[in-house]
Structures are given as C-alpha cells and as structure tokens.
Amino acid sequence: MPNPVRVLVCILAVLALPLTAASARDDRFARFAAHDPQSALHVSYDAWTILLEDIVYDVGFSNREPADPAGTRVTGTRIRLGSNSRYRYEGNRLLLHLIDDERAAAISQYREELARLPEQVSLARLNRNEQLAYWLNLHNVVVVDELIRNYPVTRLNRAGNAFHNDPVVTVDGVELSLNDIRFEIVQANWSDPRIIYGFFSGAVGGPTLQDSAFDGRRVWTQLDRSAREYVNALRGVENDTATLKVSQLYFEHRALFEPWPSALRNHLYAFANGDVYAVLDGAGGDPEALTYDWYVADLTNGSRCGGAGRGSLVISTSGEGNVQFNGGCEAVPPQARELLRAVTLRRLEMLREGRIGQVFVRDIETPSDGGEPETQGGEDGSR
C-alpha cells in the first residue's frame, strides 16, 4: 500500500507560450476554460491506478445475455436481494466490503490532493488532454470516496439528486458538484461525445469504472475502450426491438449528439459489434430511454457480508465451470455469488469459443476531411 499517496506532477518542459483565450462565459466555471495547447506538462496518476487495482473487480465485456428478471431471493420467501435489473451482470464492480480503513484513508487523502493540484500547477498551464484526464479522475475519486463514506448504500437515487448535485469538492476556490464537473466544465469545453464514458456514476447503469486511472497521454484510447464496453452492453443498447432503446445517459448528454438522433446512431455504429450493429439496423424511430439501474456498482449491491466482513476474496473454477469462493466474507451474500458465478461462466464460455480479446473491424463512412468519424471537436475533442 503506497504511503502516503501523492500526486506526482512530472514537468517535461515548461514553455513560456501564451494561453488560449478563456471562454466568454462570465460565470464561476469560466476560469476552467483556459488551457495551453502547446504545454508538455504531464500529471501522473499512478497512485490512483494502484488503488483502483486493489478495489475494482473486472467484470469484462457483456455477452448481451440478460440476467434473470426474478433476481436472487431469500430461500422460502419473496424477498429479493440486490438488483433485479436485466443489466446487473454488466460493468466493473467496486469491492466496497473489502476496503479496509487504510485504503479508505488513502482514497480520501488522494481526493484532497487532486483538489489542491491547481494550487501547485495552474490548470490553465495544461493542454486539453491533461485537463480532461484531471477532471475525469477527480470526478471518479470523489464518487468512490463518497460511496466508501456512506457504505453500505444500496440505491443512489433514493436520496433524490443530492449525490450528484450537492457540492462535494472545492477546486481553485470554486465549490463543485459531480454534475458541475460533468456538464458545466467537461461537456462545456469538450464536444467529443466519448467524454461521457469517463464518468463513473457509482451505479450499475452508468459507464464502467476502469481499474486504471485516466492518463492525459492516452485518455482517448481509454475512453474508446469504455465506449465499446458500454455501447455493446445491454444497459447501453437494448436487444432487438422495433424502436431503438438506449441508455438514459445519451439523453442526459443530448447536446453532444446533434443533429438528434442521426448523430447518436452514427456514434453507436462507430463502436458497435455485430449484435449491436444488427440492432441499430433493425430498430427505427426516435430512440427511447431505458430504465437506469441505480443500484450501487459494488460486488454485494450495498449489502454487508456476514462474519468478519473484510479481507480478501478468492474465486476458483473447475473445468466444468463450478465456482467456489474462499476467504473474504464468511458469508458471501447470494447476490454477490450470483454475479461472480455469471461472470466466471461467461469468461469460460468466451475462452472456449476463442472470443477472448476478439477485435471487431468494420468499414465506417469517413468524413470528407479524413478525420475520425466519432470525434466532433478538435484533435483533443475540445470545443
């Protein structure tokens, strides 16, 4: 466990070049629009990656097979445990029940370090990609830290919109909510729709939390991976229907998909595999929003484990697909066992069929200027 967790700013070069003009907006977010396109300053988030590797369970890509709508029940009763969403086998999971006090303190400290970064190096001295990585990482660190502080929590919408709308972090003297970061800063300054996949909402229905921090030098490659995971998951695009049904996320960020809905369809086509490509070809009409799964994206769906409750969890499988759980909770909740078993069997099936690491290649209509079809801003996706 790193001690203490610090933000390392690697200054590759300091160039005395003029900054681009800030946005004409005169509100409290305008200060975050300035940037230096020629800057070679780089921010390292290695400490956040180390923490994520400890606390994220990689579920992998969806096979587009819905979960049993009945959900997991307490034996002999009608009581359901955890989510009964069709999408509950999708998206990486936090191991909230295994996060000890040391890790929790390190994450809280890292949150404070990121918030104070502009006191060390002005964000206006960074280029757009470095700024984007900063905002995505700050947003996700805050989400994870808030979930830990409020654990156990089951559904993030039970407190209304407070989780995402209340001020939770102060940057450069400005109090910010999670939605301020998402809409007023990032969406206001980056027009590329791939940005939406970088924000971990804390809920199953949203984009997945990767087990590595965003890095300014490869942030768009990382967002591409998250986009492919989400578009090809049921929570992103539903199975064959007469009307195209997509995540509520696309409606929240509709401004990035104009003209609507053709721009949205083109975006989805750019990341779709064969199954989703067929859905897009077959479903017509204006898109409809899917029901968003607000269950917290942790392994146990907000339920405490029996017994000691903290430690490590070892999952073993046999060649026949039998799954066993060792260590960690003395009594792994049934809904966690259900998820782990489903993911493990899915991986075994994909391995047997040779689909691990499969790459989909497809011709996509190229704009006349030769640019990337899914990029609607500049080279850095900015406005």
Image: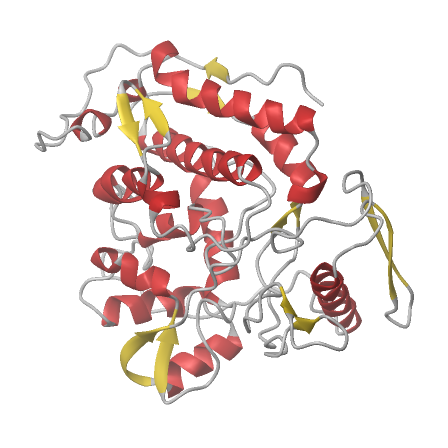
Vertically, is 356 above or below 190? Answer: below
In the figure, residue 132 lies in which quadrant? Answer: top left
Q: Give 8 or 353, whichever is nearer the viewer.
A: 8
Residue 310 image point, x, y percent: 77, 39
Vertically, is 171 above or below 214? Answer: above
Q: Give 294 or 198, whichever is nearer the viewer.
A: 294
Residue 298 image point, x, y percent: 61, 51
> Is 283 on the left-hand or right-hand side of 313?
left
> Is 163 on the left-hand or right-hand side of 331?
left
In the figure, residue 348 lies in which quadrant? Answer: bottom right
Residue drawn at point x = 30 percent, y = 50 percent? 192
> Is 282 on the left-hand or right-hand side of 276?
left
> Is 333 on the left-hand or right-hand side of 79?
right
Q: Give 323 or 303, whichever is nearer the viewer.
A: 303
In the figure, residue 246 lies in which quadrant? Answer: bottom left
The quadrant in which the C terminus is found is top left
The quadrant in which the N terminus is found is top right
Can residue 210 be seen here? The reply is yes
Residue 5 image point, x, y percent: 59, 18
Residue drawn at point x = 46 percent, y = 56 percent? 206
Can residue 37 be seen here? The reply is no
Q: How many marks?
A: 0
Residue 100 image point, x, y percent: 70, 31
Residue drawn at point x = 8 percent, y = 29 percent? 26
Q: Residue furthest front?
A: 77
Residue drawn at point x = 23 percent, y = 61 percent? 368
